[in-house]
Amino acid sequence: MFILLVVFNPLLNGDFEQWSYISTTIPFAWDTIKGSGASCTWIPDTNSFIGERAIRITSSIDVPGFDCGVAQAKVVSENTDYLLRTWVINGDTTSYARIFARCYDADGNFLSSDSVGISSSSNLSGWQQIGGIYTTPAGCYYLDMQVRVYGTGSIILDAASMFISSTFVPDELVESFDTYVPDGWLEEDPGLTSSGLLQKRTSACPIDGKCFGTKYRQSASDGDLDVVGLAFLMTDTMDFVTPTPETLFFYWRTSDLTFPNPEDSINVEISIDGGNSWTRIWQWDGTPSTTAVAETVALDVYNDQSQVLLRFAFYKNSTNSAPTNKYFNVDSVKVVHSYVGRYNRLTNPGFELWLYDTLDMMADYWERRNNRAPYSNIAQLWIMRDPVNVFSGNYSLKAYFTTTQNPFVEQTLANPFTDGCAGQLVSDIDSYSVHISTRLYDNDPNGKARIGVVWYSGTSAIQVTYTPVYTVNSTVWQLFELYDTLSSGPAQGTSVDSINFRIRFYNEGTFPDAENGATVYADSVNLTWYCFVDDVTPVDVAEMYPMHPVVEYIRHYGDRLQVSLRRPAAVEIYDVRGRLLFRKEVNGRAWFRPGRGVFMVRIGDFRRKVVLY
């Protein structure tokens, strides 16, 4: 069974991108707060963690208690653990930031308050995340999340979030190198000594006593002095299919103030084609530091890529020695995202963003239509934002319709396969597939609904598929799912210039009774697409076998392959003559190196041909 987990951040404008049209000093959906007698300013700042803006809060008068801040109250559940977090730049030693939580009952009466997690540090110039778990007390109906600034100086905030702790999806990548090599990572080290050029370090670490180190200078007696070549540590595959960009965050420091050989370099590189090609996204400038340096690398241009690899690469070209070995150490590597619709191609999938005009409202990024033509008053479909009948988040889409023309709302995803699926040759592609789903609420006997997907080439529909069943009259939310494969063959996939997700409404009355109308609600929609290549490996490696109970994916890297399992099982690899090359009990992920050629992977009743080249 494939389960899609969409974790929703109920905070509005948590990235501080939107600012009030009334005053440019008020971030949309947030309240500005200050202590008695404090002097504060709130302005947009382009030094952002995600997106284009953050908020800079400046306090010029220190008063008892907190000085300045921002706050946002949300409806919550009592006796529930909530994870409250935000990212902070704290460049002033005279100020710091801290998250504070205040709870109120349904009538607005104050219940209790407390600080959350640790405060921001003033000795780091880069982005740092603060926050922690807050348990709402009995009777808590409103949780007011406050980010408070103490002292005098400026604090920059971005990417604030609130989640129910039990449903929180971790960051895309969080690695502190407690073990080495980390699970799922790959090390390639040409070093000749037992420790090699890359190794786990327990001294001179940027944050704590465990980190990953590159031996960037070697002593005359070191066995790796004459080694030249590339050494790297590579992450597991990551999926960047998110509505907002990903960001790489890490700390580094050197063991002393020795400069590297000018012929050598230490880079961070990224690949979006399974490791066949790499692009440098960060390079050490060679200036040593014996204190932790925070680095933030925006990965905006790689948003919407589904098979991303990162590696820390040491290019060693020099054999010049140093008095002793010198190390470049890395710690606390993170790739962070927005946690909203992580594998979802749709924008505004939970109907949380809305557009208004003088007559009507509509969910942002969605359109109402009657057949292919844009919506007009002929198809009488009214769309409203509903805050009461909600499956997740703050709102759902409420559709009221008095027509029998079967109108719909839809979202168009342009040019899904024009690159041949991450650069794969069209001749190699076996099939293009999509998975769509949504939650529908239908407690009205006069109407019903279902979902569908339409594949378009220009204005011509190549293929139209709807779920074979409709909603039924019920007082519970109904899950609708559809898997659809382009049946016209892979060659036509490159001519698909859009895929349209539709929620279609059907009036079951006849005139004149049909004019009494019907109501259906929609929430939590999803669309994911896949490209399968020659029955060997789907391009979307991170979700290779979403329906298999044991096998999660098989990933290629040169002459190696990685197997990821949902539960422990024996993995067997055979050559083309049927000879058993490997047999290993795997719990989680494991790497194998059978070489280059054609192999058969067997895991219980699962069999898959794999080509390594």
Image (spheres, helix red, strand yellow):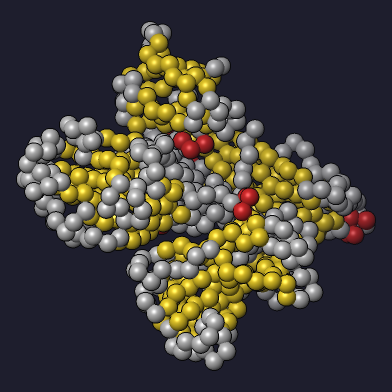
In the image, is 301 to the left or to the right of 1?
Answer: left
Q: Which quarter of the figure has residue 20? A: bottom right
Residue 227 vs 87, above or below: the answer is: above
Residue 315 vs 88, above or below: the answer is: above
In the image, is 492 to the left or to the right of 145?
Answer: left
Viewer-side residue, 356 vs 46: 46
Viewer-side residue, 280 vs 351: 280
Q: Residue furthest right?
A: 513
Where does the image place residue 570, in percent across and percent down from the top left? 49, 19
If the image is split into quadrants, where does the C terminus sit?
Answer: top left
Please name the residue shown 86% across and 47% down the image: 474
Residue 506 vs 430, above or below: the answer is: below
If the image is split into quadrants, where does the N terminus sit?
Answer: top right
Where does the image place residue 116, in percent across and percent down from the top left? 56, 65
Please name the residue shown 23% across and 55% down the image: 254
Q: Is residue 373 visible?
A: no
In the image, is 471 to the left or to the right of 213?
Answer: right
Q: Is residue 219 visible?
A: yes
Please name the residue shown 30% across and 42% down the image: 200
Q: Which quarter of the figure has residue 53? A: bottom left
Residue 388 vs 581, above or below: the answer is: below
Where does the image place residue 500, in percent across and percent down from the top left? 60, 48
Where does the image place residue 466, in percent across and percent down from the top left? 70, 40
Q: Residue furthest bottom?
A: 37
Q: How many marks?
A: 0
Viewer-side residue, 176 vs 359: 176
Viewer-side residue, 527 vs 545: 545
Q: Which quarter of the figure has residue 33? A: bottom right
Please name the residue shown 30% across and 36% down the image: 187
In the image, is 352 to the left or to the right of 180?
Answer: right
